[in-house]
Image (spheres, grey):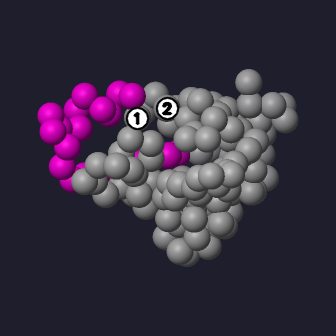
Amino acid sequence: MVFKALTQSVGSWWSSQHTYSGSAANLGIDARPGGCFCETWSGGAVRHMTVTHVLAPTTLVLNGGLGPLGTMAVAGAMEWTLKAQGGRTELAVTYNVGGYTPGGFAPLAPAVDAVLAEQVTRLKRFIETGRPQ
């Protein structure tokens, strides 16, 4: 259930504040190697990340830079790991980013962590209640 919501309903739980179009409904994940975590709307499109690993229902790995990282000289690998635990699912998200940005990554890391934590919280609420808020 969690893996399905993660991959097939991203537009239902991702925050619209963290999109280029202003609407999370424009997001989709094509959960297959080479697939796109993309945002498309009339007049624009963004490839946020590329799917590199799918081991349903336990692992999804995406490569690329989210948000402003997508315009920097960086490489990123984001792994979503799901583990069944007594009728519940334990979710871990790891986002490794390297490359070059003036001033280094230390000033950016707290903001990136906060955005990802918000999305994970929204996914949890969506799974539990049907609503991400």
What is the three-letter code of the residue carrying label 1?
Val
Residues at marks 1 and 2, CA–CA distance in whole angstroms: 5 Å
The structure residue drawn at horizontal position 30% and vertical position 32%, both measured from the top left corner, is 108
Return the residue found at the far left.
Answer: 103
Q: Alpha-carbon neighbours of circle 2 within 10 Å: few (<14), some, or many (≥20)? A: some
Q: Looking at the image, which residue is at 50% across and 46% down?
A: 93
Answer whether residue 110 is magenta in the image.
yes
x then y, percent, for residue 89: 68, 46
x and y percentages locating residue 1 in the rendered image: 79, 53
In depth, the one of 42 and 4 nearer the eye is 42
**Secondary structure of residue under mark 1:** helix
Q: Contact (CB < 8 A) between labels 1 and 2?
A: yes
* Residue at the farthest front position: 43
| Residue 52 seen in render | yes
* Residue labelled with disc 1: 112
Left or right: 87 as drawn, with respect to 118: right
Residue under label 2, please give it. 115
Q: Which span is picked out in magenta?
A: 92-111
Quarter in which the C terminus is drawn: top right
Question: Looking at the picture, does residue 53 appear above or below residue 131?
Answer: below
**Mark identifier at residue 79:** none
> Mark 2 falls on what kind of element?
helix
- Residue density around tag 1, few if under 14, some if 14–19, many if 20 or more, within 10 Å: some
> What residue do we see at 49% from left, 32% from top?
115
> Where is residue 34 shown, x and y percent of the image?
53, 74
